[in-house]
Amino acid sequence: MTFEDGELEGRPPYIHSMIAGGFGGTTGDMLMHSLDTVKTRQQGDPHFPPKYTSLGSSYYTIWRQEGVRRGLYGGWLPAMMGSFPGTVLFFGTYEWSKRHMLGYGIQPHLAYLTAGFLGDFAASIVYVPSEVLKTRLQLQGRFNNPYFKSGYNYRGTFDAAKTIIKTEGFPELFSGYKATLYRDLPFSALQFMFYEQFQSWAREYKKSRDLGIPLELLTGAAGGGLAGVITCPLDVVKTRLQTQIDPVPVPVANKQRDRLATGPKEKTFKQSQSPLPPKQQKRPISTSSPSTHTPRPGAIPLDEDSVFRGLKLIYKTEGIGGWFRGVGPRFVWTSVQSGCMLFLYQTILRQLEVWLPIERSDISG
C-alpha cells in the first residue's frame, strides 16, 4: 500500500477524530498527571535548598505526606476540564487543515507540520487558562498544606478561579501564553509530522493499516519523544521564565506600566532587599505539559520579553549543555504521554467506525 493510498483510506469523519482525540488526549494527560505534579513542585519550589530533588524521592515524599488525591493528583479537575475541549479543538483543527492542504497538493510533511501548528494554536485558547489553575493547585497541594508552602492557598478549582480574577485580573488566567506558544507550537507540529511519517513506514512494513498494539505505541512514542528532544532548548527557556520570582507584588492595573518604568536603580534595590514571604511572590505559571528542566542554583535571570535572547544568554553562559538540561526526563514524559494518547486515539477511531458506520463517500470529506 502506498503512502497516498493509506492517507485516503484513513479519513474518518471530523466528529470521529474530535471525539477520539478528546478521550485519547484526556486519558493520556490523566495517566501522566502525577508526573506533571512532581515536575511542577520541582520547578516552583521557592525554598533553598529545594525540598523536591530526584524524581523517585519526590514521588514518595508527596505520596507519603499528602496522599494521591490532594497530593499527586492535585489539580486534576481543571486539568480534565481543559484537556478534553483542548484536544477536541486540536484534532478537529488538525484534521481539517491537514486534509485541505493535502487536497491542494501541498507536500505531506509540510501539511502535517502546519496542521500541528494550527491545531495547537486553536487549542491554546482553552488549555492555557485551565493549565494555570491546574498548575497552581498542583504546586499548592491541599488547602492549608502543612508540608509545603507554595505561596498559594485555594480551597479548590472554583475558588482559585474566583480569587485569581478578583485579585490579579482576568488576563492572569493567560499567564505565560506567549512562552507556551513558543514551545508548544513547534512541539505539536514536529510531533505529528514525525508520527504521520512513522505511521506510514509502519503500514508499509506491515502491508496493512492494522499495525497492532506494539507498533501503535511505538510510533506515537517515537514521534512525541523525538519532538520533545528537539524542542528541549525552548522548554529550558520557558521553564526559566516561569520559575523566576519577582519578590515585589505588582498591582493588576499597573503590571505593564510598572514593567516598562522599572529602571536599573530599581532592579538593584530589589536585589538588595531580603526575600519577602511566599504570599507576596509572583511566580509565572507553567501552562502546558510539565517542563522537565530544573534551573541550577544561581542561574541568571532571563528577559521575559524575548525567548530568543534567552536562548542566546543560556548558550553564552552554559553552552549547548544548558540548552539540553533535563532532556532525559523530557524524552520519557513526551514519549509515554504521546504513545498513550495516540494509541487511544487510533483505538477509539476504530471503535467509532464499528459503532457509527458511515458511507465511504462521507469518509473522503
Image (cartoon, rainbow, N blue to C red):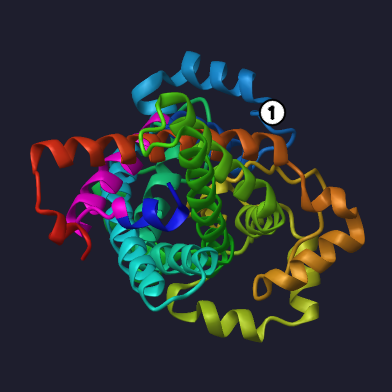
Indicate the quadrant where residue 105 lies.
bottom left
* Residue 308 picture location, percent across and down: 73, 71
Mark 1 highlights which residue? 53
Q: Is residue 363 above or below residue 252?
A: above
Where disc 1 sits, the SS reads loop
Residue range (magenta) = 9-31
Q: Amino acid at mark 1?
A: Thr
Q: Is residue 73 above or below residue 300?
A: above
Indicate the quadrant where residue 94 lies.
bottom left
Left or right? Give the position of 114 relative to 258: left
Left or right? Give the position of 355 relative to 188: left
Image point (39%, 21%), residue name: 68
Pick the residue in front: 360 or 45.
360
Indicate the quadrant where residue 238 lies.
bottom right
Pick the residue in front: 355 or 44.
355
Image point (9%, 53%), residue name: 359
Pick the residue in front: 21 or 6.
6
Image point (34%, 59%), residue name: 90
* Residue 31 picture location, percent across and down: 40, 29
Left or right? Give the position of 206 relative to 363: right
